[in-house]
Each structure stands twice: as structure tokens, then as C-alpha cells.
Image (cartoon, helix red, strand yellow):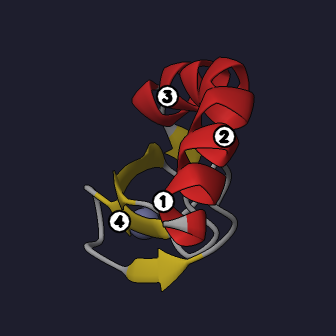
Amino acid sequence: MPVKIRSARYGRKIRKRFEKIKRIQKSTYVCPKCGVKAVKNIKLGIWRCRKCGVIFTGAAWRP
Ligand SMILES: [Zn+2]
């Protein structure tokens, strides 16, 4: 199936970049609402502040 081949190729290509993104996702960021460094990535593109609980979307690797 041509779709299967394409996705496999794509996965190999982004693996290196994905590893870098994963490392960035582990770190915390400053919340734009309360200013506390407690923002963590909970899902791809979704960020949540542990201090005030605000949930916002952003880029896949940065709030
Ligand atoms: Zn906050």
C-alpha cells in the first residue's frame, strides 16, 4: 500500500527531531497567565499550568 510506505518513510525522517522534541517536552515553561514556571506538556500541542490549572494549545514542542 502506497500510504503505508509513505508513513514509514516519514517516521524515519522525523525520528531524530522527535527525540529532541521529547526532551524539550520534559522541561517546564513559564505560564503566561500566572507567571509561574509550572507549564508542562500533557499532550502534543496541549499545555497545562500546574499552578493555576490553565490549559492552552500551542506548538507541538513549545507553549
Ligand atoms: Zn499558571
Left or right, residue 9 beside residue 3: right
Question: Label 4 belongs to which residue?
Answer: 48
Using the image, tell me which numbered label, if any, was put on residue 22: 3
Question: Label 2 belongs to which residue?
Answer: 9
| Placement of 27 over or under 31, stated as above or below | above
Q: How many residues crowd around disc 1 within 10 Å: few (fewer than 14), some, or many (20 or more)?
A: few
Q: Amino acid at mark 3?
A: Lys
Q: Amino acid at mark 1?
A: Lys
Q: Position of residue 36 (x, y in %)?
A: 49, 49
Q: Quadrant of the C terminus?
A: bottom right
Question: Label 1 belongs to which residue?
Answer: 4
Instruction: Tell me which residue sits at (65%, 56%) in the image.
Output: 6
Q: How many residues crowd around disc 3 within 10 Å: few (fewer than 14), some, or many (20 or more)?
A: some
Between the residue at mark 1 and the residue at mark 2, the CA separation in whole angstroms equals: 9 Å
Instruction: Tell me which residue sits at (25%, 55%) in the image.
Output: 50
User: What element does badge 1 sit on?
Assistant: helix
Left or right, residue 19 beside residue 51: right
